[in-house]
Each structure stands twice: as structure tokens, then as C-alpha cells.
């Protein structure tokens, strides 16, 4: 059984620590929702798992199917079954969707994928995602709308059939109908393959479609609390303020602001700026 295990993960972007000790286990065929305020490490976690060189792991381990993920280059992580649908998919002029996908499929396959089989799978997937028939011949994401780029990420996921998909706000920029189309495509692949999912989303409507069994809240680079789908529902109705109060935490931007209010006035003393009601 393929399992993702993350232990005490610390990640820097340049010289700034973003993740400050993340622990997470994702078993086969599980769906985990990763929630939290913007700028607190959700996208960083997914990028670090996938091997984006902008993100430096300074401490901790990531293993998948018993293998050391951190020792793998990005292409080997993909071959191992990891897939990241990006929040902001890049445009790649000069490379068609069909060339890109067939090359990626051949790298992951023991034998080359026949042209007939590829065309049949591509046409079926394009139809399922309700995209234009000329998608295969268009350059990768070039001139695509935001919604088209997101659906094209799901086309890639469906064609590559990863064992663990990480979806970074795949629902943002999609209208109600497109959200349903994307949700149905994700669910059909999961039913077909037993794929595991880590999904970053702010929207309960989308989470209701893909039905995560687990919800984790990431604040200031740490998973503060975890629960079931009821946790996502509570966040949707009440926001994050109750989490800040209950667990005595602040989101990253406010935590940094609080730290800046403490000013050194010597080796033996500090002056603290505190906004108190009624203070003179």
C-alpha cells in the first residue's frame, strides 16, 4: 500500500522559514483537505513534496511508498506516482499538449504508448472535461483562460493516472458548472485507480464534491489541528478566528507583525508596543 509520510518538515524560501515542523500521513485512496489562511504554507508544502527548487528543505523527511522522496529529482517523483496541479499553471509556447502528454506518459510506462491508444485516451479526456477539441494541438496553456488552465491540469492528471495527486486551489477561477465537471473527473479517476489526494481549497462547495475524509488546518507553517469533514464545514461557516483563539496562534503575517512590535533597548531589556484598549 502506497503511503506518503512527512515528518518534522521545515522548508525555507530564500532565507525565510515557511514550514516549521509539519507532520502528515496520507494512505492509499484517502482524500485530505489542507486549509488555512493565505500565505501560511499550504502551497509551500505541496511544492516541497514535488521538488520545486525554489523551496529548500532544511530539516525533516518525506517518504512515499517507503522511498526517500527528498533524494529524488523532480522527474523521478513524477515517475513514482506524484502529481501536482498547480495554482498558477505556466504557459509553454512551442510545446503542444499532445506532445507534452505523450512524452510524459512514455516516461512513466514500461513500453511506449501507441499513437492509437494515446489519441483515444486524449479525445475521451478532453470530452469528459468539456474542453475544445483542438486542445491536443494547442501549445501548453498558451492563450488559455484561467479556467481552461485549471481544467487542463485535470486533463493531465487523468492521462497520467498518478497514485497521489496534489491539487493546489484547482477550483479557483472556475464557475459553478466547471467546478462540477472538475469534481466529477477527479472522483472518476479516484474510483478507477484508488488515487490518494491532497487538496488545497477555501471552498466548501468544492470539498463537498470530492468528499475529503480528513481536514488539516495549517497556520504559520504548522498543522494546528486536524479533523474530519465537519472541520471544513465549521471553517466555512465560522472562519479561522475561533482556531486562533482556541490554539493561541496567529497567521504568518500577523505573527510577524507582533514580533516587529518588540524593540530592543539594550542587552538586558526590551520595550514592547502593545495596543491596549484605554491605554494612554
Image (spheres, rainbow, N blue to C red):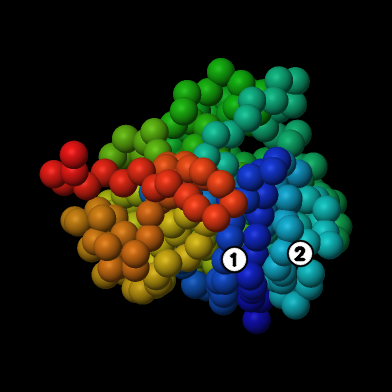
**CB under 8 Å between discs 1 and 2:** no
Going from N to C along the chain, the mark reached first, 1 or 2, is 1
Circle 2 Cα neighbour tier, 10 Å, few/some/many (<14 / 14–19 / ≥20) = many
Q: Is residue 134 above or below residue 6?
A: above
In the drawing, does residue 234 fall left or right of residue 115?
Answer: left
Residue at horizontal 78 percent and vertical 51 percent from the top:
74
Question: Residue 144 appears at what percent x and percent y?
Answer: 53, 23
- How far is mark 1 from mark 2, CA to CA? 17 Å
Q: Is residue 142 above or below residue 49?
A: above
Furthest-left residue in view?
278
Residue at horizontal 70 percent and vertical 34 percent from the top:
98
Circle 1: element type: strand
Question: Residue 267 appears at what percent x and percent y?
Answer: 59, 51
Q: From this viewpoint, is residue 155 visible?
A: no
Question: In this figure, which residue is indicated by the disc labeled 1?
Answer: 21
In the drawing, does residue 243 fall left or right of residue 199?
Answer: left
Question: In this figure, which residue is indicated by the disc labeled 2?
Answer: 69
Residue at horizontal 34 percent and vertical 68 percent from the top:
247
Can you tell which of label 1 and label 2 is closer to the viewer? 1
Residue at horizontal 61 percent and vertical 21 percent from the top:
142
Q: From this viewpoint, is residue 270 visible?
A: yes
Amino acid at each position: 500500500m502506497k503511503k506518503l509520510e512527512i515528518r518534522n518538515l521545515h522548508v525555507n524560501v530564500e532565507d525565510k522559514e515557511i514550514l516549521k515542523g509539519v507532520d502528515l500521513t496520507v494512505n492509499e485512496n484517502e482524500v485530505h483537505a489542507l486549509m488555512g489562511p493565505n500565505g501560511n504554507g499550504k502551497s509551500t508544502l505541496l511544492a516541497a513534496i514535488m521538488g520545486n527548487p525554489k523551496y529548500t528543505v532544511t530539516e525533516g523527511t518525506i517518504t512515499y511508498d517507503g522511498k526517500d522522496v527528498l533524494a529524488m529529482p523532480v522527474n523521478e517523483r513524477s515517475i513514482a506516482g506524484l502529481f501536482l496541479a498547480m495554482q498558477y499553471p505556466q504557459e509553454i509556447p512551442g510545446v503542444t499538449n499532445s506532445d507534452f502528454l505523450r512524452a510524459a506518459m512514455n516516461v512513466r510506462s514500461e513500453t511506449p504508448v501507441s499513437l492509437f491508444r494515446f489519441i483515444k485516451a486524449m479525445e475521451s479526456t478532453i470530452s469528459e472535461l468539456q474542453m475544445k477539441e483542438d486542445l491536443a494541438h494547442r501549445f501548453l496553456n498558451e492563450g488559455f483562460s484561467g479556467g481552461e488552465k485549471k481544467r487542463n491540469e485535470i486533463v493531465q492528471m487523468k492521462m497520467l493516472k498518478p497514485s497521489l495527486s496534489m491539487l493546489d486551489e484547482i477550483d479557483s477561477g472556475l464557475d459553478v458548472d466547471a467546478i462540477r465537471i472538475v469534481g466529477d473527473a477527479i472522483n472518476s479517476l479516484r474510483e478507477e485507480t484508488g488515487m490518494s489526494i491532497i487538496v488545497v481549497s477555501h471552498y466548501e462547495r468544492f470539498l463537498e464534491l470530492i468528499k475529503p475524509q480528513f481536514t488539516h488546518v495549517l497556520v504559520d507553517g504548522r498543522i494546528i489541528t486536524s479533523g474530519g469533514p465537519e472541520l471544513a464545514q465549521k471553517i466555512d461557516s465560522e472562519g479561522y478566528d475561533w482556531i486562533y483563539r482556541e490554539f493561541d496562534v496567529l497567521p504568518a503575517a500577523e505573527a510577524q507583525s507582533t514580533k516587529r512590535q518588540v524593540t530592543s533597548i539594550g542587552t538586558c531589556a526590551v520595550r514592547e508596543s502593545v495596543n491596549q484598549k484605554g491605554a494612554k
